[in-house]
Image (tube, rainbow, N blue to C red):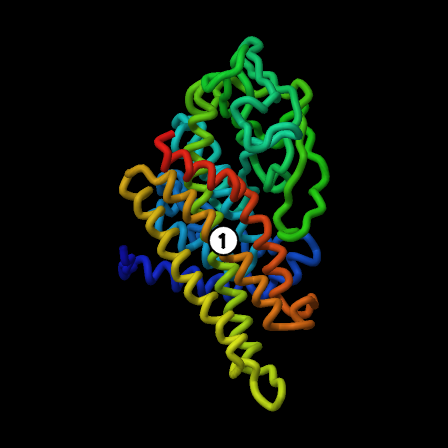
């Protein structure tokens, strides 16, 4: 299927691209080195609509279509991996469950705040020290009713945006036994007593996008902070992850595009044996493969986004797109370093940062192994 963008989508793409080129990309090195996002740019994203991609306008969002949302995340990924991951986690994980499943009161209270650019962002946390891919059976963090409140106890980890969020949507065990009806999603404001946020993790890449271990020690929130239905947390989370996989694929695509762009520039400038290295077939093939794989990934991502927008099942297509795009980005960034030679291993050139950033994409929102399991089960009728 050939996805020709509409005029509105092309204008949106140009607007976002120009903004990222001016406000985000010039600060990507600084963001990585300092571990701090460029907040001047984040604040400007509110009025532009980048902090509320799928949020209805009545709550301060842009409410763009799914393809336009993927385009936006791709452009941010092209500019800065850390900023892109922060925005994807905010839009796709922290905001989406509230938009899709939250009641009107919760939406009215929180969505205008986190989409404005004047305050902090949002987060969602699933993972625990002993629970990664196995959400249904592995989650031990609990929430119990006490009067008109939920009382949360337990530990979580790898919570992206925890320290820069107004609230965290927490996937917790609310049922007395295991099973698919034992989990729920509860919104916990980050100033809640009993919520403890550890210092950011020291990571291989994406250091400007903070990820934290968090813990709950009798943290209390109102019963009304339940997002969606009690006992439907697993189903709501899996639905959220489908959209999140499109976003991870889009970040991967943006990183790969940036790496190819840098490779093309360097290959034309760098000379060896009296010729630009772009004249050599070994380099040309790497560039050609990158361009081909980027185009394939873009079509897969936009097809999954189109299915989502149409209200059709897209879980398998999202897994395919995420799997292919994330592994593609790692290959393209790897070859970008090879093209740059020794300079590619230096922090003076951006491709080493892109390579480190791309490495997470085959892990987050479900590892490559989990994606292959999803696809195999689909093929086998599971």
The residue beneath circle 1 is 251
> Between 264 and 104, which is closer to the camera in this rendering?
264
In this view, the residue farthest toward the front is 380
Position of residue 138 measured from the top left corner of the image (x, y, whole percent): 58, 24
Q: Quadrant of the N terminus?
A: bottom left
The residue positioned farthest toward the bottom in the image shown: 274
Which quadrant of the figure has residue 33?
Answer: bottom right
**Mark 1 residue crowding within 10 angstroms, few (<14) / some (14–19) / many (20+):** many
Q: From what the image shows, is residue 313 above or below residue 224?
A: below
Residue extending farthest to the top is: 147
Image position of 123 with respect to 249: above or below: above
Please name whichever residue, 102 or 157, is drawn nearer the observer in this view of the structure.
157
Q: How many marks?
A: 1
Secondary structure beneath disc 1? helix
Return the x and y of residue 358 as percentages of the image width and height.
57, 54
Q: Is residue 64 visible?
A: no
In this rendered view, identify the residue nearer to me: 48 or 217: 217
Residue 145 makes an appearance in the image: yes
Residue 178 place in picture, x, y as percent: 53, 15
The residue shown at (59%, 48%) is 360
What residue is rendered at 36% in x and 45% in y?
A: 63
Q: Indicate the position of residue 382 as horizontal and vertical percent values.
A: 38, 29
Q: Is residue 224 left or right of residue 203?
A: left
- Residue located at (61% from left, 19% from top): 152
Rendered residue at 41%/56% (across/down): 297
As displayed, is residue 61 above or below residue 75? above
Whether 267 is drawn above or below 46: the answer is below
């Amino acid at each position: 299927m050939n996805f020709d963008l509409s005029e509105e989508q092309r204008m949106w793409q140009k607007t976002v691209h120009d903004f990222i080129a001016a406000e985000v990309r010039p600060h990507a090195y600084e963001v990585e080195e300092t571990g701090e996002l460029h907040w001047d740019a984040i604040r400007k994203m509110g009025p532009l609509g980048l902090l509320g991609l799928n949020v209805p306008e009545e709550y301060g969002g842009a409410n763009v279509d799914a393809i336009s949302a993927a385009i936006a995340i791709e452009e941010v990924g092209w500019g800065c991996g850390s900023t892109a991951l922060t925005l994807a986690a905010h839009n796709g994980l922290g905001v989406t469950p509230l938009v899709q499943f939250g009641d009107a009161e919760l939406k009215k209270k929180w969505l205008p705040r986190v989409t404005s650019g004047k305050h902090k962002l949002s987060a969602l946390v699933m993972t625990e020290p002993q629970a990664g891919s196995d959400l249904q059976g592995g989650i031990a963090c609990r929430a119990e009713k006490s009067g008109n409140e939920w009382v949360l106890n337990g530990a979580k980890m790898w919570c992206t945006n925890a320290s820069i969020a107004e609230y965290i949507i927490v996937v917790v065990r609310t049922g007395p036994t295991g099973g698919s009806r034992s989990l729920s999603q509860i919104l916990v404001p980050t100033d809640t007593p009993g919520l403890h946020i550890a210092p950011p993790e020291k990571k291989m890449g994406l250091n400007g996008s903070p990820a934290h271990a968090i813990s709950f020690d009798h943290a209390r929130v109102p019963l009304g902070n339940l997002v969606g239905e009690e006992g439907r947390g697993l189903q709501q989370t899996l639905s959220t992850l489908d959209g999140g996989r499109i976003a991870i694929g889009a970040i991967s695509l943006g990183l790969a595009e940036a790496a190819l762009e840098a490779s093309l520039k360097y290959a034309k400038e760098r000379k060896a044996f009296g010729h630009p290295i772009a004249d050599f077939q070994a380099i040309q093939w790497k560039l050609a493969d990158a361009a081909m794989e980027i185009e394939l990934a873009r079509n897969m991502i936009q097809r999954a986004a189109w299915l989502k927008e149409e209200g059709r099942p897209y879980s398998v297509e999202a897994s395919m797109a995420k799997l292919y795009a994330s592994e593609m980005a790692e290959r393209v960034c790897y070859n970008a370093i090879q093209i740059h030679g020794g300079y590619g291993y230096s922090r003076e050139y951006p491709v080493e940062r892109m390579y480190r950033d791309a490495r997470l994409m085959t892990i987050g929102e479900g590892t490559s192994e989990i994606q292959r399991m999803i696809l195999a089960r689909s093929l086998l009728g599971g």
